[in-house]
Image (spheres, rainbow, N blue to C red):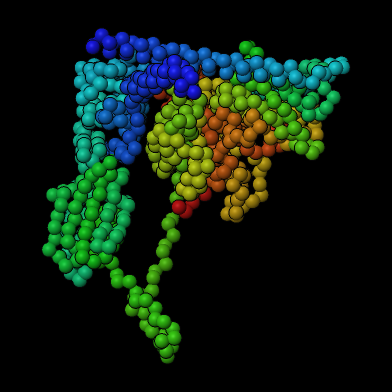
Amino acid sequence: MTRRIVLVFAALLLIALGLGVYAWQLKRKVARDEELATQQQLAMAPPAAGPPTPVTLYVASDPDAALRRSKTSLVLPAERSERARAVLRALFGAYLQSSSPHPIGAGADVRDVYLLGENTAVVDTNSVFADKHPSGVLAEELTVASIVATLNANDNQIQRVKILVNGQERETLAGHADLQRFYLASNIGQVVKDLQ
Amino acid sequence: MSSRFPLFQHRARFLVAVMFTAAILLVAIFVHHPALQAQRSEASGLTVYSSQTSYSVSLLDINGQPYVGLVELLEPLGSVDARPDGKKYKVRFTAPGGHPEEAQFTAAKDKAKVRGENYKLTANFVLQNGRGYVPLASTANLLAKLLSTQTEFHPEGRRLFVGISPERFTLELHPGNPSRLLIGFASAVNPTIATEPGRVRLTFRREPVAAAGPDKTTYNDPLITGASFSEHDGVAELDVTGNAPLMANFADGGKTIIVTGAPAPPPPPPVAEHVPAPAVQAVPAQPPPVPRQPAPPRFLVLIDPAHGGGDIGAAITPSLAEKDLVLALARRVQRELGSRGIASGLLRTSDVAISLDQRAVSANAARPALYLALHAANTGRGVHVFTELLPAANASPQSFLPWDTAQAAFLDLSNVVAGSVAAELEARKLPNATLQAPLRPMNNIAAPAVAVEIAPPSGNVDDISGANYQEQIAQSIAAGIAAIRGKLPEVRP
């Protein structure tokens, strides 16, 4: 009788372990699928053609709490919102490098940029951007300021910027910076001066 | 289906049965895992009374026993440096003006070392997510040993007196018409008073009061029939019962509470059509009500230790969360402000979650002279003092303020505070910067407001929790506020 109980218990334990492994593999599969989806999204971006255009990026640096203006060249699409998106993706690209002094979560991306009227841009980021963003007043402010300042520097008609996460409004970026407001480029300009 | 595929059905049933049993087994494994057994006690906490302060500590139910977070217990009494080291948990406690004392605990063991001597807890020490917990029953002895002071624990009331004795109150019945029960205290008290027909209940949350005589007293009086004292869930209660409605009044600067009969309610107004209009105005039987004197303005600094509960804020190190670091810093700042004669309050005193809107509502309701938010991060270096990133508004602070931009009307004063705190940080040679930030809920605060975010002073992130570094920051903040106190208006509560 006791032997049978031990055998049944061992069998159940094995099944439990098996289910655990299965759940773990499912989780990995979901992660792989998400990664694949992101790559497919990248591949679906409209091809840009033409000569490289000089663009200005405001790149944040955590150790010295600074925003630095830097120049680079990109082949940009013709459409305004696509251009804005391409510029922001270049900014995110800088942050995603392993040597970045202002790292953001791996996989962070700009899903879309919508222009409302002439002067308002709505930046839709993916959920990884907010979920994996380092938490802190300064770190989050640097990110927000760099996005707004970069958009304004490359399209001076953009005066107001709103940041969404996965198409939704979120209370804060990672617990600190307000994402419910529209950021004014003129207001961020003062922050940029303070951070240079 | 069942007749066509009997084998399939048999196997399917067997598979379902096995999976169901496995699921139960899994649940059983999880439920019995010690790390998952801890649950925050719903209704009760421990109240600690000391000569410096009174505070509440939440209890954790582990294996059916109440436990207390060691850091939460010690922090209000002095400076605490606690860190896990494998299965060990090392605590270094320094009372204000005292020498550091050390204690060492081991996870799942009841043996510890306190001030170099062996010490036995009433149950095993629990180390969970980098935090150490001791059994509630051990707290009095442990504090007595670590602090070298006398302690008195009232287990039924969950009240712990550290370095002080309970203040005994006296009851004195003055028969008359109406009779009065005088409750005398050694110092001023401020209990919550609740009345119901034939009863007045005084609830003491922060006062270390206890009965001088028996817990229950009966009076042979036509109005006041008895008084009973009880302690439970960290509070003390005094119930006075009577044969008629009772009321309580403060006297002698809050050192005496007088319970007596409540005045009879005025008779219902007569129905107009049945009563002729009086020829002359009747003299009222009761004197006209005296208009309530508005409370005098006071200078209160409201400290908001950010995050709490499930919102841990930034993970400063794998074992140190922003929510814990800023609560410890908030208590240091409160002590430093107190030593400069500045009253202050904490928006949270334990590890509880408060939403951003709730923080703003509570802060605005408290009507502080200054709102101070505390944050911590492992990015950047030194101390950053923030004011809200809003365009300055011309609105008067007395006017109706939009919720999202309430802070705009106070930005000038907020900048004055930030500059003063930064100057004090500079004087102590602490790396610092003053910036504007789009920080919630600071934009909703209708009072001068600053946020301070501390980061490691050097490249080593562990230095952020150094006692000397935190003390220097707390002193800078308090000194900065004290320096411009005259520029900030006092506010009526």
Left or right: B137 as drawn, with respect to A178: left
- Whether B329 is drawn above or below B188: the answer is above
Name the image quarter holding residue B285: bottom left
Question: Can residue B209 be seen by looking at this rendering?
Answer: yes
Task: Please state the total of marks drawn on the protein image.
Answer: 0
- Whether B475 is drawn above or below B367: the answer is above
The residue positioned farthest toward the front in the image shown: B3
Name the image quarter holding residue B151: top left
Q: Position of residue A135 (x, y in %)?
A: 55, 26
Q: Position of residue B49 (x, y in %)?
A: 28, 39
Q: Position of residue B276 (x, y in %)?
A: 42, 89
Residue at 76% x, 20% y is A45
Q: Position of residue B162 (x, y in %)?
A: 25, 35
**Closest to the observer, A76 or A29:** A29
Q: Dividing the image into 4 quarters, which one contains the C terminus of chain A?
A: top right
Q: Dividing the image into 4 quarters, which one contains the N terminus of chain A?
A: top left
Residue at 39% x, 35% y is B350
Left or right: A82 as drawn, with respect to A111: right
Left or right: B221 as drawn, with respect to A87: left
Question: Can residue B57 be seen by looking at this rendering?
Answer: no
The residue positioned farthest toward the right in the image shown: A50
**Closest to the observer, B191 or B398:** B191
Name the image quarter holding residue B291: bottom left
**Closest to the observer, B45 or B173:** B45
Residue at 17% x, 61% y is B225
- Whether A97 is drawn above or below B159: the answer is above
Residue at 49% x, 43% y is B358
